[in-house]
Image (tube, grey):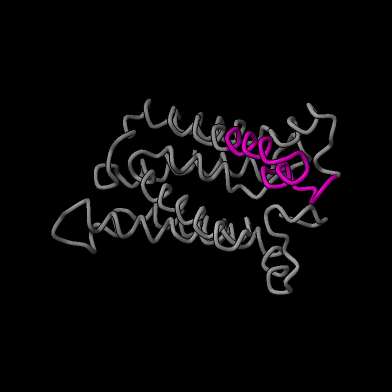
Amino acid sequence: MIWIGFIVLGFVSGSIPFALLIGRAKGVDIRRHGSGNVGATNVSRVLGRPYGLLCFALDAAKGAGPVVAAGLVQGVFGATVAAVEPTAQWAWLAVAVASVAGHMFSPFVGFRGGKGVATGFGSMVAMWNILTIPLLLALAAWLCVLAVSRYISLASIVAAQVVPIAFMTIMLVRDGGDDPNARVVHAMPVLIVTIGIAALVVLRHRANIARLQRGEEPRIGQGRRAGGA
């Protein structure tokens, strides 16, 4: 029952539309400018990079808060995946997923929302130490791809794919044990969710992928086009 409460908390926290609130504070309805997306990227394009970074930080924090609270109360915060039972893995992951779902389908924005990259990052990086290192590696990949390509959408897609790969690698190398197959089975909840989120990020960016293929996706600093990320 405690886990259910944290899952609800995750959804409610994730549904807070910080992009919309920041826009309103500046006298702008973010849904009517740029791409219309209620997320940090559109805030950055419409209001400027400082406000975009603020929105990213707030969106990440609203995902991280419920996950950290749940981990501390349930005694799994700081444990390796080998030390967390699969049922507890599922429950903790459900809190993170609920936060992302709240952001994507916020009841405060007509059950619409952003693409969940910042909130997903915050909720999963807060799962110390099961997903913290994979998420930091994904952040490094995001920064590298962004620096080379200047496409935020492409950087986000690549970073999402890094998470399950990095988790699997770290889990097999670091967590020890004589039977790697048993370790994979034990960690299956985390693998399933991270792979699912990676696929969802691709799905949510399908319009961006189409624009990348046509050469129409705006690079960072290139101005604002309707239909952007």
Front residue of 222/176: it is 222
Give the residues drawn in magenta, as a range. Answer: 33-59
Q: Answer with left or right where residue 227 lies relative to residue 129.
A: right
175 up-or-down from 179: above or below: above
Where residue 98 appears, x then y in whole percent? 56, 41
Where residue 56 appears, x then y in whole percent? 61, 39
Residue at 63 percent across and 59 percent down: it is 151
Residue 8 sits in quarter:
top right
Residue 219 sits in quarter:
bottom right
Q: Answer with left or right where residue 53 lies relative to residue 170.
A: right
Residue 31 sits in quarter:
top right
Front residue of 74/124: it is 124
Residue at 39 percent across and 57 percent down: it is 191
Q: Answer with left or right where residue 12 lies relative to residue 162.
A: right
Is residue 61 shown in magenta? no
Where residue 6 appears, x then y in whole percent? 49, 30
Residue at 29 percent across and 44 percent down: it is 85
Q: Total number of numbered labels?
A: 0
Residue extending furthest toward the left? 178
Where residue 144 appears, x then y in whole percent? 49, 57
Residue extending furthest toward the bottom? 214
52 up-or-down from 182: above or below: above
For the C terminus, the image quarter is: bottom right
For the N terminus, the image quarter is: top left
